[in-house]
Structures are given as C-alpha cells and as structure tokens.
Image (tube, rainbow, N blue to C red):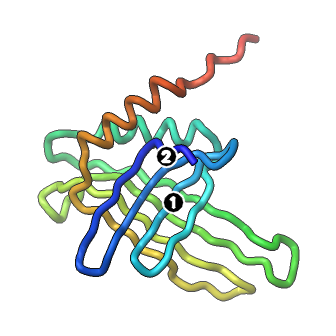
Amino acid sequence: MDSILSCHWHDQDGTWELTVRRNGPAWELFAAAPFGSESLPFADPDEVRRLAQTLLDLPAEPEPYEFEWTLSRTDFADTERERTLFATFAVGLDPDDDHRPYLAYQSSHHLRGFAALGLEVICEDPPVDHLRAQAHAFLTNCPAPPPLQP
C-alpha cells in the first residue's frame, strides 16, 4: 500500500496514526490507536485531491478553517449481519485552542438499528510542513484528469 499523507505520533498509551493510502485501485483513510485500527474508503481520487489541497491551503495565520469528510463502508450488505461503519475526518485550526492545527477522526458503528461510537484519533499540532510537502507531491504525481470535452 502506498501512503501519500501520513501522520504518526506516540504518547504514554502507544502509537497513533492517520494515513491516507492507496489500497489496490482505491484510496482509503487508515486510523490507528494503541487499542485498534480501521480503514474507510474515499469515494474517489478527487476526494483525496481535495484533502491534499486542503492541507496545502491550511492558513499560517489564526483564522477560522475546517474541512470535513464523511466516509463509510458497509459490510455484509443486504444480510442479517449487515453493518455500516461511518467516520468523520476533519482538518482544521481549532478556534478554541489558539487556532492550533489538528487532524481528527471519529467513527461510529451501525448494526441492525443500534449505533455505537467507534475509534477516535486526534492529532493536535500535526507536522504541517511535512503534510504540505506530502500533499504537494501527491498533487504533482496525481493531477486531476482534464475536463471532458463536449
């Protein structure tokens, strides 16, 4: 799997990770905490390009800034065991914490009418320059396709 945007950090509990990577022909967001991990697909490469551009556009000065993506995956569709995993992934500047940059992931699991919170992974003060360099490299190597001609 090729990762194109990756943020890893360690604390007293262990290793944490938020990574956008290619898994075969698809792109996915991988979230890991010391006690578990999960991955969810992006709708298409354009979603990954928007994420990369969002990281490039992250303001250097304090100002309101937040972009969110909603991702989902359904396993065992149309069966008694059908379950859906939803997650929100956000990139922004925290207005309640001196506009400090962050990456945040929160998931929830839905099974037969029941819902439960899932994994929460928050990277405060991510390595913004490193993420911008990764985003720039991705956009350079995977540019958007040209518009269709009528």
Query: Against 108, is 60 above or below?
Result: above
Asked if the residue at tag 1 contacts the one at tag 2, i.e. Cβ–Cβ closer than 8 Å, the answer is: yes
**Is label 2 in a helix, a strand or a loop?**
strand
Q: Depth check: 115 or 144 in front?
A: 144
Q: Quadrant of the C terminus?
A: top right
Q: Write the residue at 53% across / 48% down.
A: 21
Query: Against 51, is 8 above or below?
Result: below
| Place of residue 32 in the rendered image (x, y in percent of width and height, measured from the top left) | 45, 68
Q: Write the residue at 41% across / 35% down.
A: 53
Q: What amino acid is at disc 1?
A: Phe
Q: Is label 2 or label 1 in front? A: 2
User: Image check: 72 left or right of 97?
Assistant: right
Quarter assignment of residue 9: bottom left
Residue extending furthest right? Answer: 79
- For label 1, the crowd category at 10 Å Cα-Cα, with few meaning under 14, some 14 to 19 and many 20 or more, is some
Q: Depth check: 115 or 105 in front?
A: 105
- For label 2, the crowd category at 10 Å Cα-Cα, with few meaning under 14, some 14 to 19 and many 20 or more, is some
Quarter assignment of residue 130: top left
Q: Which residue is mark 2?
A: 3
Q: What amino acid is at disc 2?
A: Ser
**Is label 1 in a helix, a strand or a loop?**
strand
| Place of residue 100 in the rendered image (x, y in percent of width and height, measured from the top left) | 18, 56
Q: Which residue is mark 1?
A: 30
| Place of residue 69 in the rendered image (x, y in percent of width and height, measured from the top left) | 50, 54
Query: Against 83, is 19 above or below?
Result: above
Sequence-wise, which precedes: disc 2 or disc 1? 2
Query: Against 20, is 88 above or below?
Result: below
Q: Write the residue at 54% across / 44% down.
A: 2
Q: Write the residue at 24% across / 40% down.
A: 129
How many labels sit on residues? 2
